[in-house]
Image (cartoon, helix red, strand yellow):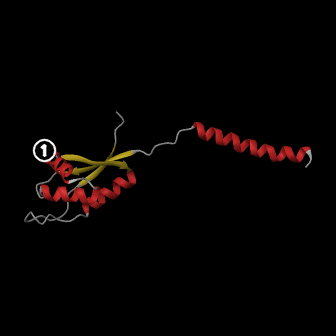
Amino acid sequence: MTQSAAATVEEPLAEVDRKRAVRKDQKPKRQPRYNVILLDDNHHSYAYVMVMLQTLFGHPLEKGYLLATEVDTRGRVIVLTTTREHAELKRDQIHAFGKDDLIAGCAGSMSSMIEPVSDG
């Protein structure tokens, strides 16, 4: 290989190495975080909330009880913090969970929403 041919092969390799070095120095960007918020109502029992949280989020019944108590007393509770896409999925699953068979006149699922996590 001639000297000029070797130089043209090495130049692109040097550029690739430089780009790799820059990438190693950069930290990956984290996706923004979102809270899944369960909202209180008077049409669902603690048992319903506990089972729903266990089914959809994998929370043990004890944690489900604590979250049910908080939503009942404060009007809302954060049940999960995650990426926006996952938070939207979990909100939709809450809305689709169905009515509480223990409460006469319960028309449907509980309400929930998502909101960005505040940096502060």
> According to the image, label 1 marks what residue?
73
Q: Residue furthest top?
A: 120
Dot 1, crowdedness within 10 Å: few (<14), some or many (≥20)?
Answer: few
Q: For the point 73% across and 42% down, which residue is it? A: 15
The residue nearer to you, when weighing 74 against 54, is 54
Q: For the point 30% across and 49% down, which residue is it? A: 80
Secondary element type, mark 1 = helix
Q: For the point 65% across and 42% down, which residue is it? A: 20
Q: Quadrant of residue 49?
A: bottom left
Q: Quadrant of the C terminus?
A: top left
Q: Which x, y percent locates residue 42?
A: 10, 55
On screen, 28 above or below 48? above
Q: Which x, y percent locates residue 108?
A: 18, 64
Identify the amino acid type marked 1: Thr
Q: Which x, y percent locates residue 70?
A: 16, 45
Q: Which x, y percent locates residue 61?
A: 19, 54
User: In screen coordinates, is 102 left or right of 117?
Assistant: left
User: In screen coordinates, is 55 left or right of 4?
Assistant: left
The residue nearer to you, when weighing 103 against 54, is 54
User: In screen coordinates, is 111 left or right of 80?
Assistant: left
